[in-house]
Amino acid sequence: MVFSPIPTSELIQQDREHLIHPLYHPDEHESPVILAQGKGAILTDVDGHEYIDGLSCLWNVALGHGRTELAEAGAQQLQTLAYASNYTGFSNIPAIQLATELMKVVYPNLRAVYFTSGGAESNDSAFKTVRFFWKTQNKPDKVKIISRMWGYHGVTIGAMSATGIPSYHKNFAPMVPGHIHIPAPYYYRANTTANWEEYGIEAANELEKAILAEGADTVAAFIAEPVQGAGGVIPPPPTYFPRIREICDKYDVLFIADEVITGFGRTGKMFALEHWGVQPDILSFAKAITSGYLPLGGIVISDRIHQAMMDVPVADKWMHAYTYSGHPTCCAVGLANLRIMIAEKLPERAAVMGERMLDGLKAFADHPMVGDVRGLGLMAAVELVKDKNTKESYPAAAKVADRVAQEFRARGLYTRARGDVIMLAPPLMIPEETLDKAVKIVGDTIDSVYNAVKSF
């Protein structure tokens, strides 16, 4: 099948001359895969090569590619009311309906939603909202945000300052003042003698130490992904978030749950903090709310914050806005997506398929190159090491990540890695046989790369 009348070489040249990509350098983009079609859990490039979508593209295509219901919902709304301002004084039916439906599935303490276009916008909105809230409480010095190393919250200037992955900071410093990072609950790399549950308390107590060091009267909020995603799929011990909630309550610090990746079924629950019986003060979401079919995100705020927003005088109103907040077409697709997700019980399916995926990956745990296998629901990681005993990583000269990427491309698997950490998060609807094939490709790739880097 011919997917483009323009030759692939010409497309690549036009791309190189005119298109800037995220995380861009031309040396890493000499022969890009130009995708042309998606169906279910399979992506096809312009030359007809197929790839299993092992990362739901960017953690977002939960329902899989080519769902006609979502296309039809968008098309119908485009013909009815494609766009309208959602600024105060105006509203639209899809935004109202989606907000109402969301309240049925989010944490019970949450009350109202503000829509954005994506995850970074959502987290920036959360940061501004916590500042607003504390000013309404006559605590204007509470402005600092505590986040974690290996946490990813976006790369706008505010979200980047909370992101705890140093490679995103280089050439963009200085960060926004008032951002503090604490260690992640990264048990595999932790310098500890504690067991899994004990370590959860130990890691959470890093938040208390930071609050005391900064002064509780200066700390506005703590932000965390329930399972750290782009930083390497790092699930916490079960004791971690209950202790985090205790600390936030003790020092009157708001807790922002960044569920941009973990929300909408990814971990086997509709939202990931449900695993540990914890509720946040603000929920950030994006990605799977529309399965990536249109850009949409948002924050859902607690009753306490919402009440403060409702009670301030007009002169002190919440002066925050985006042109596309409450975009009718995006909300219409989000509504259709949410209803399908619930009807097809995709969070429950993610729990079952996630166990299958993790069990398959754990079969490689004894491989001399595999240091750790971890995950929760349909998100998992395999961390590669040079030495299993010391956990020493391969030197940069070994180019392990590049070799892994090349093998995946050749074998027909689309996913990504953080350094030497292979990450998987396929669509929630992925068929069993396709998931098993993706896991096998991971194993075959590890064998191939190990043989190639033995001399390092």
Image: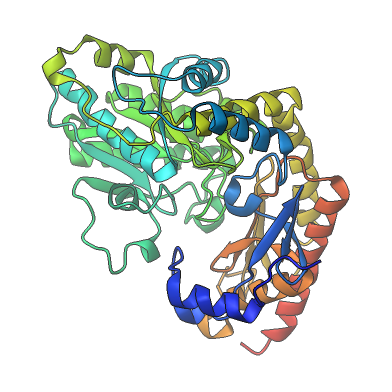
As drawn, the residue found furthest toward the bottom would be 455
Q: Say left or right for 211 vs 435.
A: left
| Quadrant into which the C terminus falls | bottom right
Q: Is residue 333 left or right of residue 413?
A: left
Residue 227 vs residue 330, the one in the foreground? 330
Side (left or right) of 425 relative to 299: right
Q: Is residue 217 visible?
A: yes
Number of dots carrying numbers:
0
Instruction: Give whichever of 368, 453 is nearer the camera.
Output: 453
Residue at 81% from the left image edge and 66% from the top image edge: 1
In the displayed structure, would residue 298 be above or below residue 62? above
Residue 384 percent coordinates (x, y): 63, 68
Q: Residue furthest front?
A: 79
In the rendered view, tell whether residue 249 sits above or below residue 222.
above
Q: Quadrant of residue 301?
A: top left
Tell me which corner region of the image, top left, top right, bottom left or bottom right, holds residue 281. Answer: top left
**Residue 283 visible in rendering:** no
Q: Is residue 102 left or right of residue 62?
A: left
Q: Of all residues shown, which one is farthest toward the right?
A: 433
Q: Is residue 119 above or below residue 160?
A: above
Q: How is the image coloured?
A: rainbow
The residue located at (64%, 70%) in the rendering is 33
406 shown above or below 381: below
Residue 136 % position (x, y): 17, 19
- Residue 310: percent from left, percent from top: 26, 11
Residue 306 is situated, as x and y percent measured from the top left of the image, at: 32, 15
